[in-house]
Image: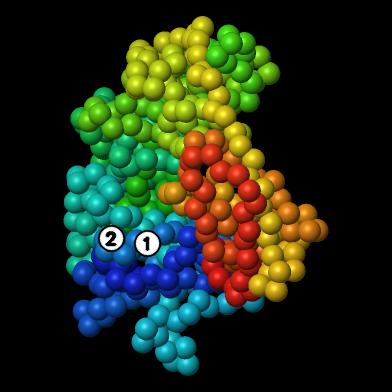
Amino acid sequence: MTWADVIFIGKVTYSNHYESGGWAQRTLIRFEVEETFKGLSTNDHEVWIDPGSFTSCYAEYPIGHRYLVFASSRWGFFNTAIMSIYKGPLGLKPPPPGFDLSHPPKVYFAPECSGTQELSGRPDDIVASDLAYLRAWREGKSVTRVYGRVLDDHTPAWPDPSAPGLQGATVTLEGAGQKLSALTDSKGAYSFDGIPAGQYSLEAALDGYRAFPPGVNYDLAPGTCGYGEFNMLTDGLLEGMVKDFRGHPATKIELVLQRVLSNGSVDFMGLTTTDQKGTFQFSDLPRADFRLGVNIDRQPTVEVPYALSYYPGTSQPSSIHLELHEHRKGLIFNLPPPLKTRVVNVVVTWADSSPVANASVLARFKSGGVAEMTQTDRQGKARLVCLADVPYQIEAAKWLPPHQIARVAAHSERYDLPAKPWTGVMKLVMDRTSRFF
C-alpha cells in the first residue's frame, strides 16, 4: 500500500482494450470514482488507468465492473516485467472521446500485479475487512495488523480467492520480540490485530497439508497491514491410461481435470497430456469430487478430434471421489471414435486477382476462437484441414511484424463454411487496410 500513489473504489466507464491486450499499443481505462482512500481529493470524480500496456502483467477491466484500485504514477514499477523485446514505438490507440492529447489528464499505472481487486469477485468478509481497514487508515485510526486466509487450493501459481477456506489451520506470526498463533475460522480466515510495527515472518500449517508459499515476510510500519494467503496442498493422486476406441493406448491426448464445488459448479484443477504409453497422472490433489475429460471446456479440433467425453468414456458428466491422501491408480479412460476430417481448398488473392503468398488462412468456430490455421503458397493456394460436420467461418490475414502481433496488415471478410458437405474452391479476397485482429 505504501508504493501506491492512489487508492480508490471505482467503476469502469470506458475502455479501449482490444482482444490482443496491451502489447502493441497503449490501453486507457476510465474509472468513475466512488470512494477515495489515498492520493485523490473529494473533487476527483474521474481517474484514467493504464492496465499494463507493453508488459507481461496486463489487466483487463470490463466496463461496468467495480474495483478497489491500487495505482502508481510510475509506469512499469518494480514488480512488473516490461517487455524488453518490444522494438516499436509506444503508440496510442485512437484517443477516447474528450481525451485531449495536447493536454492529457494524469494516467496512473495499475496492471495485473498491482493488487487491484474486483470487489464482486472476493469473499464478502475479506472485502468488508479490507474496506474497514482502509477507512480507518484514511482517518489515521488504523492499527498495525497481519491477516489473510488459508485456502484449500490446488493451483499455487494462481491463487483463487473463491477457493474454499480451511478451518483449523495454525497460522504463526513471529517478529518484534514475540511469537503469536491463531486458528483459521470456518472460512479459512485469520487475523493478528494491534501488533507492534516491525519485521515479521508468517507461516501456516495443518496436518496432512503443506503450505504454498512456505512462508511470507513483512516489514510493517505503524498503522499498516500485511495480507497473507496460503494455498494448502495435499498428496492426492489420480493415475491411469487413455485408450482409443480400438482399445489401444492413446498418446498425446490432452486431459482436463475439474473439481466439483459444493454449489455444483466446477473449478479448473489441471491439464496434462498422455505420454507414449497413453498414461496420465494428476498429483497434489485435495479431498474432493473430480471430473476428468477430453474437450469438456473447449471445442474439438483436428489435433484433438474427439467429441466431449468424460471419464470413463461418456458424454454425460461423472465424478471421481478422492479422499484425503488417497491414491487412485489404474483408471481407464475410453475415448470415442475420432471425428472425421475434411479438406477445404482455398485461394487467396488481392482485389486485382493477383495471388497472396504466405497469408494465414484461418478456420474460426462460430464463437470466434481459431480452430485451424494454414499458410498459402506462392500461388495463394492452401489446403485447410477441418473437422467434418462442424460449421466454421473462414478468413485470411496478413500479419504485421512480430512486435505488432495484435494487428494484421491486410485481411479478407469472413465466409461461412457450413457443416454439411461442401466442395469446390473457396476464394478469399484480401483488403489491404490494417486493423486489429
Say which residue appears at 33% left-offset and 42% top-offset.
Answer: 161
- Identify the mark at residue 65; answer none if there is no mark: 2
Whole-percent x and y of residue 392? 50, 47
Residue 407 appears in the figure: yes
Whole-percent x and y of residue 436? 54, 67
Determine whether label 2 and label 1 are within 8 Å by CB: yes
The amino acid marked with disc number 1 is: Tyr
Q: Residues within 10 Å of mark 1 (few under 14, many from 20)?
A: many
Q: Residue reaching furthest right?
A: 378
Whole-percent x and y of residue 54? 57, 66
Question: What is the spatial separation of the Cα atoms under label 2 and label 1, in whole angstroms?
Answer: 7 Å
What secondary structure is marked by label 1? Answer: loop
Q: Residues within 10 Å of mark 2 (few under 14, many from 20)?
A: some
Eyeballing the image, is 301 above or below 65? above
- Identify the mark at residue 261; answer none if there is no mark: none
Position of residue 186 in the picture relative to residue 304 (left or right): left
- Identify the mark at residue 61; answer none if there is no mark: 1
The amino acid marked with disc number 2 is: His
As rendered, which of 125 and 424 lies closer to the eye? 424
* Image quadrant in which the C terminus is located: bottom right
As rendered, which of 396 and 324 lies closer to the eye? 396
* Number of disc labels: 2
| Location of residue 85 by image quarter | bottom right
Q: Residue reaching furthest top?
A: 330
Residue 409 appears in the figure: no
Say which residue appears at 28% left-offset and 60% top-offset.
Answer: 65
| Location of residue 325 by image quarter | top left
Eyeballing the image, is 371 above or below 81? above
Position of residue 396 in the picture relative to residue 96 (left or right): right
